[in-house]
Structure formats: C-alpha cells, structure tokens
Amino acid sequence: MAIIQCDIRRGRSDDQKRQLASGLTYAVSEITGEPVDQIFLVIREMPGFNFVDAGEHVAEYVPGPNGVDMAGAQQLRDRGVID
Amino acid sequence: MAIIQCDIRRGRSDDQKRQLASGLTYAVSEITGEPVDQIFLVIREMPGFNFVDAGEHVAEYVPGPNGVDMAGAQQLRDRGVID
Amino acid sequence: MAIIQCDIRRGRSDDQKRQLASGLTYAVSEITGEPVDQIFLVIREMPGFNFVDAGEHVAEYVPGPNGVDMAGAQQLRDRGVID
Amino acid sequence: MAIIQCDIRRGRSDDQKRQLASGLTYAVSEITGEPVDQIFLVIREMPGFNFVDAGEHVAEYVPGPNGVDMAGAQQLRDRGVID
Amino acid sequence: MAIIQCDIRRGRSDDQKRQLASGLTYAVSEITGEPVDQIFLVIREMPGFNFVDAGEHVAEYVPGPNGVDMAGAQQLRDRGVID
Amino acid sequence: MAIIQCDIRRGRSDDQKRQLASGLTYAVSEITGEPVDQIFLVIREMPGFNFVDAGEHVAEYVPGPNGVDMAGAQQLRDRGVID
C-alpha cells in the first residue's frame, strides 16, 4: 500500500490530471512492486501564490503549448535558475 | 512548483528509492509542464502495520523477485482482491 | 497530542462534518488515551476527480439517503469491488 | 474515497493501533457514507518531542492504566489546561 | 532540504501570506542551517469550519486591527482558554 | 487555528528543534494573528536520502559550525546552485 499526495498549482486540464493520476500510479507500482490496487493518490490544487520556493511566491500557472508553464518559466529565467 | 509526498512501507532498497525519485519527478514534470527544478519529493517509510486499507493492517513488505511484494500479494489473494 | 488530517470528496453537509469532527476526535482520544484537548483535526475537501484509486478517478459524491454516496457505489459496482 | 493521516506520539501497543485503525475507518464510513473499502489510513509515529503545542514540546507518551498517558496528563496539569 | 506545510483558515490578505512565506522560510533556514534555496512551503487555506480543536469547529477568521482574529479570540474567551 | 508540518532531514540537535518549534510558532502567530495557543506543529525527520530535489537525492545532514550543513552546501556547490 502506498499513499501519494501531490500538491500542484491550479489550472491543469482534466486531461493533464488524468495522465498525472495514471503516470504516478503506474510509476510507483512498477518500481516498488505495490499492486496498482494498493496505490491511492490525492491531488490538491491551490493558487500559485500559495507555493513558496526559497522565500518567493511562485507565479500562477499559465498553460502554453504542450502544457508548458509560460509564467513559471519566465520567473525561473528572471532568477537565473534556467536559461 | 509541485510537492509530492509518498508514504510507503519500509523495506525498499536504495536502488528502488532512487528509481522512485526519478520516476515520480519526471512523470510529474512531463505531464504538468513543471520544470524538473521545481519538483520536490519526500518519501516517508513506516512499518506495514501502520498502513490500513478497508480497516485492515497491511502485511510487511517482503521483497520477492523484481521487487514484487510476496506478503502483500498473499494478503490480497486471501481477501479475494487479486487472483 | 495527535494531528489528524482527513482528505474527503467535497459535498458533505455541515452536519456530516460536525459528526465527523466529533467522531474522529473521540475515537482517537478513547483508544490512544490522548486528552480530547490535545487532538487537532483538519478536514480537506476536493472534487472527487482529484482522488485516484488504483489509477482511476473517483466519481463525485452524490448524497443519497443517510448520506450514502450514490455515484461512488455505482462505480464500485461497475468495477466488481462490491455487489 | 477518503485518506486519513494520523500523526501520534510513539509508544502505543499494536493492540491500540489495531483499535485505532478500525475505530477511524468505521467512524469515517458511517458518517460520510464512504464504503469501508474506500478508506485508507496511515499512522505516523514520532517522539513526543517532535510534537509542539503552543510553542511547547509535548512530553513522551508513558502508558498508564487503560492506555491513559501519564506524562502528558501531568504536563497539561502543570500548564493549568486540565485539573 | 525542508518541506513546510501550513494549513490555515482562509481570509488572510496577500500581504499576510507574503510575510508568512518569508517568516517561515527564514526561521527554518537560520535555525536548521538549510540554505534558503532548499526550503519549500505550501500554504493551504480552508474554511474555519474545517478546523477542529478538541472536537469543536473553529470560528471563521474575521480580520481585526493588525490581523488579529476577532471571532477566534471570542471563541477562545467563551471556552475560558484565554481571558 | 493553524497546523504546521515540517519535514526535515534527521540529525538536528534537541536545541535546534526547540528553536525551530518556537521560531515557527511565534512567526505564524505574529503574522496571521492566530493566538499561540492555537498553533500546532509536528516535525518529521527522515534520512537525507528520502528527500529529492529536482530528481536528485539530498545528502545527509552533517552539522558544521552554527548548525550549517556541510554536506548539503557541498552538494549545492557541485550543482552550481550556490558559490
């Protein structure tokens, strides 16, 4: 038995959440040997402002092509974490 | 930014935990568009006895071939959940 | 001291949440010997879609007689988990 | 589906944890209408020192008659919370 | 690395949440020696009714001068916990 | 009422945990207006290996002067996150 909790910024589509659910469940099952039947997941969604990394509030999720987060990428670029 | 918490029964090898870490991180990143840099995971381990499914304590994890859980599979078989 | 977190599907009435609060608090107190004064609970509510069991999203909670969940029971019936 | 997390001080007997598991599961099921089959619980145990109430560390659990916590009761008495 | 989860009653201003984010991050960093860069926080907000202390639902947060909670203070006064 | 959960790597001294407890409690109280009496904290400790940042396991905590983490700082330096 495994319990997975995933706190993410709000704004993902139902389809993304569907993929997230099956992606996490099957990853945990394959790697740990837990039967799929014994894996339980809750996805919690909150505004980006409620997530804090290194003391800074994260930007809201702005869906771009293929679900890439436009605003978050910009914020990381501004801080020099990614190019 | 995503925070993942994964509560599992104790007994997995470092190698299984290494695969779990990268499996969960890359699954969440690909599906939600979060950069890998923004995904944080904590794995918590407890005795099987501390996990309860439908009012019943789960058996301890007993590693079988390919990490399959021998004891857990037997317990599910006894309850008729799997064959 | 005990901290209880209870993640449930949204849709329960205030009266159900009131019973849940006192049911959980007194159950933990009686069994563990914690004084009631030292038991703290947070109830989190999310859409059924955010709950995933065995890789499948759970149906939304649809209150039936005595608070029984009509939609969830149907879903379990479809999967053969209950009759 | 409901996920319950219960963080308690270490030191309870297996029998207390068994009662806790069934007490919590059946309380949630009866009150919310979730089938027992859809209720998942993890019990986490930590030293009393890791629990903090009003800025003060809680005493370790010292089992007395009927599981009553001797040390904790004394601490609450010292703070004037109970008689 | 540290993961902080803070469940509070809804109703705080963005400015309070901004102070909370930096207050918690810097407190943990100074005390534990974790670099600020390795501290991740999620703030979850729920109605006061979803918080239960000693079996009683907490009043909703009603902002008073300097963010003091008017309703909560009254409730504690009624129970004799504060003057 | 506020519930704070703090997951950290094991290895901090009782004195560091004592400071952490009071630091977090008073920070939350001052900023949110919650009375100290209504703030509950649980500190969970796990091996560094159970913490994963950007897909990489975090080094164990190695206490240096003033509680600074020697191993973690080295790891961040190797990844180019800090100088």
Image (tube, coloured by chain):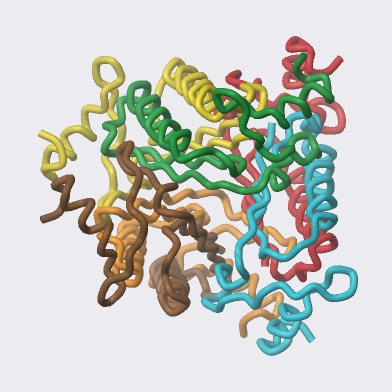
Chain colours: A orange, B brown, C yellow, D green, E red, F cyan
Percent across and percent down for residue C74 are 16, 34
Query: Going by the image, does E65 lie left or right of B21?
Result: right
D30 w.r.t. E22: above or below = above
Q: Is residue E48 visible?
A: no
Q: Position of residue B73 (x, y in %)?
A: 22, 58
How many labels, in total? 0
Quarter the N terminus of chain C occupies: top right
The structure residue drawn at horizontal position 62% and vertical position 27%, both measured from the top left corner, is D64
Single out the residue that lies furthest toward the top. E78
Say which residue appears at 54% left-offset and 30% top-offset.
Answer: C32
Residue F16: give x, y in percent of width and height.
82, 57
In the rendered view, would you say A47 is above or below E10? below
The quarter of the picture where residue B70 lies is bottom left
Q: In the shown orientation, is residue D58 left or right of residue B25?
A: right
The quadrant holding residue E71 is top right
| Identity of the residue furthest to the front in this view | D65
Up-down relation of residue C75 to residue B70 (above or below): above
Please name the residue shown 82% across and 56% down the image: E27
Check the picture and name the quadrant holding the C terminus of chain C.
Answer: top left
Q: Position of residue E34 (x, y in %)?
A: 76, 68
- Identity of the residue drawn at 83% across and 60% down: E31
For the question of whether residue B64 can be seen, the reply is yes
Q: Nearer the viewer, residue A43 or D68?
A: D68
Of A66 and E40, the residue lying toward us? E40
Relative to the observer, which residue lies in front, A58 or C68?
Answer: C68
